[in-house]
Amino acid sequence: MVIFLLRGIVGYAQRYLGAKLEEGIIKEIRDKLYTRIHALPLSYFVKEHSGHLIARATSDVDGIRRGIKDGFLPIIRETMLILVYGGIAIYLSPMLFLYTVAIFLPIFLIIQRLSMKLRHESERVQNRMAKVTRALSETFGGIKVIKAYAAEAEDKRRFDKLTLAHMRTMLKFERLSLIGTPLAEFMFALAIAVMLILGAYAIFIKHVLTASEFILFIGAIVALVQPVRNIAQANSLLQRAINVTDRVYRVMELPCERTHGGIPLGGLKECIVFDNVHFAYDTEYVLVGVSFSIHKGEKIAIIGTSGVGKTTIVDLLLGFYEPTHGRIIVDGYDLREIDLRSWRKRIGVVTQEPILFNTSIIENIALGEPTVDIKRVKRAAMLAHADEFISKLPDGYNTVIGERGITLSGGERQRLALARAIYKEPEILILDEVTAYLDRESAQKIEAALEEVLKGRTALIITHDESTLKLVDRVLELRDGRIYSI
């Protein structure tokens, strides 16, 4: 009874420690991947669909876990058994063991070839899964438009097509995976039959082996059947894990955005200068020879038709992209030489489509701050004219606002985004069409807030709103990729 109790305790400890090691490895991989995703340049997210990155961080990392648990560890364990039984066979008859190796060599070559095919099919399975994930991401993000256009049936047909392609690819992978075990068993049985013939020859004709030794030899070889079968089963999972590990580490090896290591900026002392800035997405130039300056404390507005490149100027100023030609100079330093993290900490940004998170209002306003100052949060909300609607919510500032702030109106979301920028207490404010899609009442509240918020700050404002233009010192027009004074 004591033996059974000890065996249970040892088994439990072994499984728990194994699970702890496995989960520790997976957590470290997922944390490193998440850190790397944060460090990727904005251009990567523009070109790569979010569904692919979601697949890397979720299903691919889970594939690594399954590969460790059901692939790598079983292969190590079964290999140890093969070495033990193989050692016994060598001790009994080295020559017969060499014949055995020669017989088994084709089996291992076939398994190796099958492994390569499994890895290739695993890559196809993961690519299909990434497309399914991407479709789900697009559906969740655009569910309002899908419903508004009564496009549910068409969206479902598109999704069904993707899941069918995934199923077919997965079934092909499973067919290859399932072939491995019976094939290995059949060839193993064939090898045993050949060995029996060789054993009879060694016992009765050559007299180099006794019957008892041969029985022990066969017993050792037969004992290898289950470990070999287990390895064949684990191998398909291992090949899939190798494939997804490669996909994860391809993201890990992508070049990072340069945010650290430059000149730390103590604050804007003089001015920001765009000096003959050209910029192209791929080969098409959006900006051509753009030159203007913003002095400390000055408010400048840039107007221009949609798609002319106004938001590109904002992205360049934030260091999301570097000019193709020309320079952006901050207090005499090229922005390329400045520590981008220290630079961005001095800038508050409000875009025309505010991005909010599925957390509380407090956490949304104090985004990026390790500790939250509730008084600052409320003061920022009051300046942004957001306190009036927040105070009416059931949980006030602790209200969780849903994914992308779906529970709030457009004007309320915009005022929260402005409160976030105010809470940061930035030296520089960048406002990109903040009243473009708001009703007149909401726009007036934003404009009233801006009049107070802009005092004493440097600002770059992208707008067409006449009321907002009254708040600036100069107006520039971006036309045909060039800047003109108005």
Image: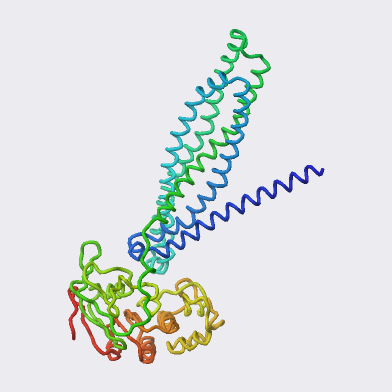
Give coordinates of residue 308: x percent, y percent: 23, 73
Give coordinates of residue 250: x percent, y percent: 40, 53
Give coordinates of residue 5: x percent, y percent: 78, 46
Give coordinates of residue 357: x percent, y percent: 47, 73
Residue 300 placement: quadrant? bottom left
| Residue that appears at 59% across and 34% down | 227
The one nearer the camera, 359 or 326, is 326
- Quarter of the C terminus within the rendering: bottom left
| Residue that appears at 43% across and 61% down | 36
The answer to whether any part of residue 17 appears in the image is yes
Q: Is 9 situated left or right of 167 in this image? A: right
Total marks placed: 0
Q: Is 43 situated left or right of 223 in this image? A: left
Whether residue 393 is situated above or below residue 223 in the rendered picture: below
**Which residue is most to the top?**
205
| Residue that appears at 22% across and 80% down | 292
Residue 285 placement: quadrant? bottom left
Whether residue 137 is situated above or below residue 19 in the rendered picture: below
